[in-house]
Structures are given as C-alpha cells and as structure tokens.
Amino acid sequence: MHAFAGTALAQQVPSDTATVTVSAEGKSRQVQDVSKDDLIKVVPGSSPLKTLEKMPGVSFQSADPFGTYEWSTRFSARGFNQNHMGFTLDEVPLGDMSYGNNNGLHISRAISSENIGHVTLSQGSGDVGTASTSNLGGTVQFYSSAPADVFTISGAQTLGSNSTSRTFARLDTGLFGNGSKADLSVTRQRSEKWKGTGAQNQDQFNSKFVQQLGNDHKLSAFFNYSDRKEIDYQDMSLDMIKRLGSNWDNYAPDWQRAVNAARGIFTGGVNSLDDAYYQGSGLRRDSLLGATLNSNFGSMVDLKTTVYHHSDEGQGHWYTPYTASTNGVPIAIRTSEYGISRNGVLSDLTLELTGHTVNAGFWVESSLHSLTRNFYNASGPQDTNVFLSNPTSTGFKQNFATKTTQFYAQDTMSFADNKLKLNYGFKSPHVTVDAISIVGSRAAGEIKADKSFLPQIGVNYALSKNNELFASVSQNMRAFQPGVDGPFSQTQASFNLSSANLKPETSTTFDSGYRFKTADLVGSVALYFTKFNDRLLSIAPPCAGIQGCPSLFANVGEVDSKGAEAALSWTPVKNWTWFNSATYNDAQYKSNYIDNNVVVNIAGKQVVDAPKFMLKTELSYDTNTWFARTGAKFTDKRFYTYTNDAQVPSYVIVNLSTGYKQASLGGLKDVSIQLNVENLLNKNYISTIGSNGFSAKDPTGTAQTLLTGAPRQFFITFSAKI
C-alpha cells in the first residue's frame, strides 16, 4: 500500500512548447492538466498515465513499452497507488483500475488514447464530487475530445519494435442538422511481447454524439467498445533474474519442456515448478456508454446529470502444473473468470451567488460482479487465448451485488477582492456489498463501509497576481472491495470471525505550498503530511501465486508519510522549454501486525513500492515544423517486503521523441511523422514490483513478484487529416 504525497506545477508554462497546463491557480489543492499535445508526443497507444509520470510525486511502472499491460501497470500519485485512487472518464467512474477489477475498467480499454482530449490529475484528495469510493490519495480524470465542427477524416499508422502495428482511423461528421455533431473511430493494435512468445492485441470502437438544445442545454452521449487479448510475461524473483536472466519468460511454444517440468524434470537452470509455466494470458471485452445533459437556468444555476452503463466479460488463463487435466496431461488451464454489469447516475447542481459558489450533488451505482475459478483440460500447444467454456471442474464461484450512494456539498467563498478564497465541503459515501458463494469455501455475507461526514477544507491567498499560497486538509475513505482480494476472499469461518471488526481504510491529508510564475519561469513547492488509518492487509498462507490460496483479511494499523516536492519549468528562449521536478517522500509503517500468532516487526520501516526520491528532467523543442523532446526519470530504490529485507535498485530511464509536421501537404492537413525511442540507453531494470502482492520477508530472494522493464524500443508514426 502507498499513501503519500506531492504537489506540482501551478500555472500554464508561458511558452510555445507548453503542453502541461496546471490549472491550480486560485485553488486550495493541486490540479494539473495534461493537454492533447502532450499526449500525442508519446508512442500512440500508450497509457495516458504514462504521460503523468513527469509530475512530482508520480510513479508509473509497466513491463511493456506502452504501459497498457494491466497485470504490470502500477500508478501512484503522492505515494498512493492506483488501488487507493479514483479514476473517471467524462465523469463516469472507472473504479480503481486494478487488475481483476470488480467495479470498473482500465483507461486503456475505456477509450483509445488518440481520443483523449486532456487528463486532469488532482493529488492528495480530489474534489468531493468525484464519483469514487477509493480515492484516499487523489483522482485522475480523463476527458474525451469533442467531435470537430467541420467534416474531418483522421488517420494514423504506427510501426515498430516487436512487430508492432497500430492503425487508428476517425471520422468527424462536422455540424449537421440543428446543432448536432458526432465522431466515430476504430483502432487495431497488434504487437508481440518483447521477450518470450505471444501477442498483445486490442481492437476498439469509440463514438461520441453532441446535440445542442437551444441556448441553455446540451446533450452528449458516447459508446465505447474494447476487445483485448494479451499473453502474459512471467513474474520474476531476484533469484530467477540472477539464475535465469532478465529475459527469462514462460515456456511457450515449447510444450514438451512444460510437460517435463510439471513432472519434475527441470532443464537449463530451472529448479522449480514456478520458474515458468507453459503460458498465461488475459482477455477482456468491455462496453461502456454514457449520456450527459448540461442545463443552464439563467446566470446563477447550472445542472449536470450523467447516466452510464458498463459491462465486462473477462478471463485470465494460466497453465498450472499444480492440477492435472482429466486426460492425463500433468497440466491444466486454470482460469479466473470475471463479469461486471454496472449502472449509475450522477448529478451536480451549481449555484453562483454573491461571494459564494455552492455545489451539491449525488452519485448512485448498482454493480453486479461475478468471480469464478475454473479448470479446463490442456491437450498441447494449441491457441487457447479465447473465451473458454465447459470446464472440467470449478474451484469457487461467487456473485457480488454492490450498492453505492454518495452525497456531497461544498461552498467556495471569496474575500478581499478575490485575493482570499476559502472552500469547505463534505461527502457522505455509503457502500454495501452482498456476496453469495455458489461453489467452494469462499465467504458469503454482507459488509458495509460508510461515513456520514468526510470534510474537506482549503484556503488560497494571492500575494500578488503571480504569487500565491495554498493549504488544505481532507479526509477520505476507501470502501471494501468484492472480488479476488477483498474480505470475501477469506474462508467463511475467517470472514465470520473478522468481518464484524473490520474497518474501512481512511486517510487524512494536510497539504500546503507556494506557487509562482514570471515571464519565463513557472514553479511550485509544497510540504505535506498524510496519516493513513486502518490499513487493510490480505495475509495469505505460503503458496505460489498461481495457486490462489484463500487469504486472511485484517486491519493492521497506521502509515504516516511526510515530504516535499518542487517543480520548475523554464523557457529561456522561444520554442525551448526545460521542465524539472523533484520529490522527497518519507512513508513509514507505524504499527506492527500479527501473522499466525507471530509479531511482524515493521513499525518504522519504509512503505513498499514507495521510492523516497524521484527526479525528472525534460527538454523540449517545438516549432511549426520540427519538434523534439528528451527526458530522463530517476526512481529511487523500492522495497517489496514489509520488513524491508528485500529491495530493487534505483534506475534512470531516458526517452526520446522527435518528428516533423506540416499544416498542409499534398491536399492533406496536419501531416506528421514521429519517431519515439523508449528506454534510449537500453537500461536493464526492474519495473513492476508486487505483481503477486507483497510479503513480510524474502530472505532468499525467491518471491515471484517482480517484472523486468522493456529494453530499447523504436516506433515510427505517420498521421494526417483530410
């Protein structure tokens, strides 16, 4: 778990090359906005979360060059990992975007990256009106681009390392009828893994419709579809990396070696069943749709209402040597099968009064989630990366019904000719999860998480037009989660013993800072303190991650973090910008915990996967025709055990983007060719940690919970419009 800190740039960089707009001016908390121009400078198809990693306090990790391989993707802002943050797309909640998600989906499936208009990061708390019950540490809000007012056909083709081919095509209708406009797009991506064998493929369809209704009302609606299939990378340990090398992966397509290993016959440095499996894969099929009505009632009243639906079908496949097929093969295909059906509504009312801006609203969601562990016969080296049916046996099956209601209200007051602003508000989340166990020994029952009053108070004082101070304090709660790792992953007996005493996780964050800007400088500094209470920990008995043993769930105490952050953007001359950010984050466990009647001494230890220091530097050049950007990110060592007896080393990654563009060329518009080089210096490093969770100790370096980062990769993209 991570629960920790930061700030960032305060206003827009006064430069032609500025692409990071931090719209926090006048606010009591940090709000940063990444523009469309910044998003298109990364490799097409990359997760927009990867663009945010330049900000102070933000850490992004992934085993693939795109940052879309969800098993490995790790995002943290102010030290809170994505399980403790909130994410939305056009206000529609995406849940916590974790793997095996029960209440949402990852942004890489929710929308094609080319269709994202901008991304807003709110560190520390997020607005009280955000539709999330996991945002202990902030929110990330994605906004789709609007349909163009004129008829446009856009296209882009990316080719590159690992046989990558990504095709994107979009049609904008332009204005038609009585204030109507729409867009439709398709995306097809095919790519091989950078090591081992297997494809990571995705097909997407996105659409959006906007209708102006008179002068005071606007209706917008979208429908997005995604079909993603990916072959997994093998989880590594420090021992495996030393013994087998960073490029080690699963056995496929060598079926006979996998069968031999399942029978205990190891070759080539392998000494364990878990050094490799034949193959693993993930499949996700999602439909997401929503509609929003914006209404203006005079100059003082605005009402915004959104309804949405999300459906998901997913399977995760592993060829397990721990279960034999009924046909005599010593390997079976073990699946985790997911289903989600969510329906919800959000509404926000804004009143503009003299000296006050008042907001109030609600969010209601009903979510049905199913989780099944099935086993299927394996018969040889065949393509099983499809949705399987008719299992030979079922390990467990659970259904969950989650009801969420959240009310919020806030007021922003202005004093002294708007130099002093005070905002105060609260939210009241109430979440109930009902679980039914159909097959197996996993728990059934009901569990609730609710808080009637979670306050948020902030102040902003403008020392001058270009200098301001800010401070805020906020409280947040994370609801209990159904699904793979929540309280219902316990046995019924364990749930009956623990559920009455379980408390939802909460955090209290104090943040203060100073923002400034001059003709060629924009910057900010901040100090923070976060107290994280009632940390929940799933304590599992010793077994390999593939076996999925039942866990114990308990509150294990507090985490305190304190730190400082700074960001500075300098524009020495026209067309050039030099951006720098620095983070210091001291996050420590404050409480020991008991595991099987043994005290685990972690008080005073550093929080796992929370680097103490991070530094980012980026130099950009941008004219009407040529553009280039190179950046380097230092990430400090990270612990992956609670007792801090095991860690991965620090590293520096350098990326490069450069290209040529023309406003018009040969009858085409906005023509560009762009080269991206990821990991320019070909650094060998460990990216993701905690892929199979974290443990108390790893004295022998055998915990398989690490993933190595991708080596140097090249991509070239051609794009144009007509």
Image (cartoon, rainbow, N blue to C red):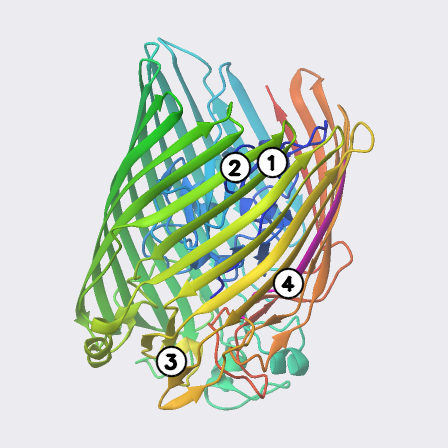
Three-letter amino acid code of the residue under disc 1 = Glu
Task: Give the image location of residue 257, x and y in percent.
Answer: 54, 81
Three-letter amino acid code of the residue under disc 4 = Gly
Mark 2 vs 1: CB contact within 8 A: yes
Q: CA distance from mark 2 to mark 3?
A: 46 Å
As drawn, the residue found furthest toward the front would be 416
Kind of element beneath mark 4: loop
Could you say which disc has been placed on residue 540 in the image? 3
Task: Give the image location of residue 145, x and y in percent.
Answer: 49, 29
Q: CA distance from mark 4 to mark 3?
A: 27 Å
Q: Residue at label 2?
A: 460
Mark 2 vs 3: CB contact within 8 A: no
Is 609 inside the magenta-drawn segment? yes
Three-letter amino acid code of the residue under disc 2 = Asn
On the picture, is 669 further left or further right than 202?
A: right
Q: Is residue 335 above or below residue 215?
A: below
Badge 2 or badge 4: first in the primary sequence: 2
Q: Nearer the viewer, mark 2 or mark 4?
A: 2
Badge 4 or badge 3: first in the primary sequence: 3
Three-letter amino acid code of the residue under disc 3 = Ala
Badge 2 or badge 3: first in the primary sequence: 2
Badge 2 or badge 1: first in the primary sequence: 2
Can residue 64 be seen at all in this image of the molecule?
Answer: no
Kind of element beneath mark 3: loop
How crowded is the residue under tag 4: few (<14 C-alpha within 10 Å), some, or many (20+)?
many
